[in-house]
Image (cartoon, helix red, strand yellow):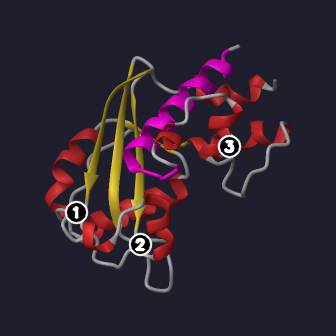
């Protein structure tokens, strides 16, 4: 129903990369949170070809709320490698790609902040596509509860009957599984928009 409102998903290229982060919390008076994990899922010919997760040692403390979401404690995060030590492989994945993010208004500024903070070079990319914002017209027409950012990944997973990777992890979020989940949802929405 209202598949024409998913048309924008049919315009995505066959190859792109999905990015997700888990962080120390939310932005506050001290600025953006730190990245604890960064997940990338590579989509080739409209199918998942690879997923990888980078665990990065934050400078800020992981809040209790964030730990409840992703399950990573401060003691565990303290053993991760620094963000800058892992940037080269991350940048290689992103280079010349369209980057798809569910809730890009959260993840993208945090990533850019880290690149600036560590004095790193950002690779050329094709652009950023927010699957959450792109789904707003469809969600509104369907009367699906959404925040001002759009329908959540959990909501879209349920609405399109996509396998729920988080359920297998006891409901915990993870950058790798959330990037995989986004890729599955985006491709399902692409097929629905093509009907």
Q: Earlier in the sequence, mark 2 or mark 3?
A: 2
> Number of marks in the image?
3
- Magenta residues span 171-194
Residue that numbered label 1 is attached to: 83
163 over 28 or under it: above or below? above
User: Image quarter for residue 135?
Assistant: top right
Residue 57: percent from left, percent from top: 24, 67
Tell me how far mark 2 sits from mark 3, CA to CA: 25 Å
The residue at which mark 2 appears reads as 33
Residue 24 x %, y %: 40, 70
Picture coordinates of residue 169, whole percent (x, y): 45, 45
Q: Main secondary structure of the magenta part?
A: helix
Q: Are marks 2 and 1 in contact (CB under 8 Å)?
A: no
| Alpha-carbon span between mark 2 and mark 1 | 13 Å
Task: Please identify, in this view, whether the residue under mark 2 or under mark 3 is nearer the observer.
Answer: 3
Residue count near mark 1 (Cα–Cα under 10 Å), binned few <14, some 14–19, many ≥20: many
Q: How dense is the environment of label 3, judged by Cα within 10 Å: few (below 14), some, or many (20 and up)? A: some
Magenta stretch containing residue 177, yes or no? yes
């Amino acid at each position: 129903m209202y598949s024409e409102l998913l048309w924008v998903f049919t315009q995505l290229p066959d190859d792109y990369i999905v990015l997700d982060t888990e962080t120390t919390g939310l932005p506050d008076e001290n600025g953006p949170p730190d990245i604890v994990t960064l997940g990338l899922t590579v989509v080739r010919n409209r199918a998942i070809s690879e997923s990888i997760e980078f665990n990065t040692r934050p400078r800020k403390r992981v809040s209790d709320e964030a730990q409840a979401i992703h399950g990573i404690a401060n003691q565990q995060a303290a053993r991760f490698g620094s963000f800058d030590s892992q940037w080269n492989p991350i940048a290689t994945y992103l280079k010349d790609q369209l980057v798809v993010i569910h809730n890009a208004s959260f993840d993208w500024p945090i990533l850019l902040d880290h690149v600036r903070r560590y004095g790193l070079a950002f690779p050329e990319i094709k652009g950023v596509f927010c699957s959450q914002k792109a789904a707003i017209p469809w969600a509104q027409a369907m009367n699906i509860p959404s925040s001002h950012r759009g329908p959540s990944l959990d909501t879209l997973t349920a609405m399109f009957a996509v396998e729920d990777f988080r359920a297998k992890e006891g409901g915990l979020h993870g950058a790798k599984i959330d990037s995989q989940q986004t890729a599955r949802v985006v491709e399902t929405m692409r097929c629905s928009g093509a009907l």
